[in-house]
Amino acid sequence: MKVQHGIDGHTPPSYAIVTEGTFDGVHLGHRKILSTMVEAVQQIRHFNPSAESVVITFWPHPRLVLFPEQQDLKLLSTLEEKTEALAAIGIDRLVVLPFDKTFSNLTPEAYVEQVLVKGLNTRRLIIGYDHRFGKNRAGDFSFLKANEERFGFVVEEIPRQDVEEVGVSSTKIRQALLRGEVTTANRYLGAPYTLCGKVVRGNQLGRTIGFPTANLYISQTYKLIPKDGIYAVRVRFNQAIYGGMLYIGVRSTLGNHLERTIEVNVFDFNEEIYDSFLQIELIAYLRGEEKFDSLEEMREQLKRDKENALQVLAV
């Protein structure tokens, strides 16, 4: 997949089928739009082999720019994670548009002319049922449909995608993760929710009770961290996959009520991996954080947690 930042200085496709949005999480609703686009491009290539599927996304997330005083927005995907997911789906080109106050003031018409028409040579635009764009979010499906002939491309709207009669949205996935409902979030995402972090030094207490952990530092402060507790996880490191259990919390047993930590105990693993990066796939929420009266009591509970995690991961 080709990744380009901005429009200027890039050669547009000869024929582009385009979709656009923040695509946070690249969930099942997004995948419905993306798969429709990929299938459409495959059909067009019988007549135009150079046709491309193009995804436009915006970075930073528009809400972080338009409402900087509101720091409560947490995202499901970093830009790198989003890029990886789109490439796996089979998208040909990802266009990352830098989002700032100047860009946000483009009228819908100016946006269409500069980005979709001149910048990408769009021939077909596929959007979600609630898509809005341009200054004050004034652009919508009705505006695009009324101007198809003038803009030179056709527009298609994908209806709301439901899972078990519940509308899929990034907001609902965020809410599920904050409640510890990982299986629900994963079902809506169509893949496990992931955390990626750098291994840093901790207090190494886990080694003394038989459960050494890798402490993760996640540099993207906007990344959503799920509910505190213990999770069954899969750990990806150096192209290998390991089972494990993840702890998110404030180490209440140790009396630390200030610093939230993210630690993973990797099963059947004994390597020094400081400064390495681990990708953690959350599979199931096992229990909430507990305060134990002794380290021995905590160790016995961790044994039970590991047994539960192994059962979950074996399914």
Image: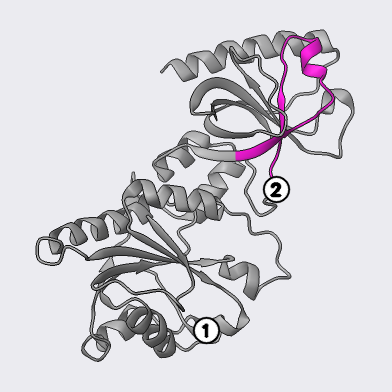
Residue 66: x and y in percent read 63, 75
Q: Crowding at label 2, few (<14), some or many (≥20) Cα neighbours within 10 Å? A: few
Q: Is residue 10 left or right of residue 233?
A: left
Label 2 SS: loop
The foreground one among 249 and 79 is: 79
In the rendered image, which quarter is residue 272 located in?
top right
Q: Is residue 140 left or right of residue 101?
A: left
Work out whether mark 1 precedes mark 2 in sequence or the reverse, and give the earlier one: 1
In the rendered image, which quarter is residue 277 located in?
top right
Residue furthest out toward the left: 47
Label 1 SS: helix
Res 136 label: 1
Confirm whether the magenta stretch covers residue 41.
Answer: no
Q: Is residue 16 above or below residue 247?
A: below
Residue wearing tag 2:
219
Q: Crowding at label 1, few (<14), some or many (≥20) Cα neighbours within 10 Å? A: few
Q: Is residue 307 above or below residue 105?
A: above
Query: Is the C terminus in the top left, top right, bottom left or bottom right quadrant?
Result: top left
Res 57 label: none
Q: Which residue shows up at 67% across the image and 51% down it?
A: 220
The foreground one among 223 and 166 is: 223
Image: magenta residue range: 196-219
Residue 43: x and y in percent read 13, 60
Q: Which residue shows up at 24% across the image and 73% down it?
A: 14
The foreground one among 213 and 144 is: 213
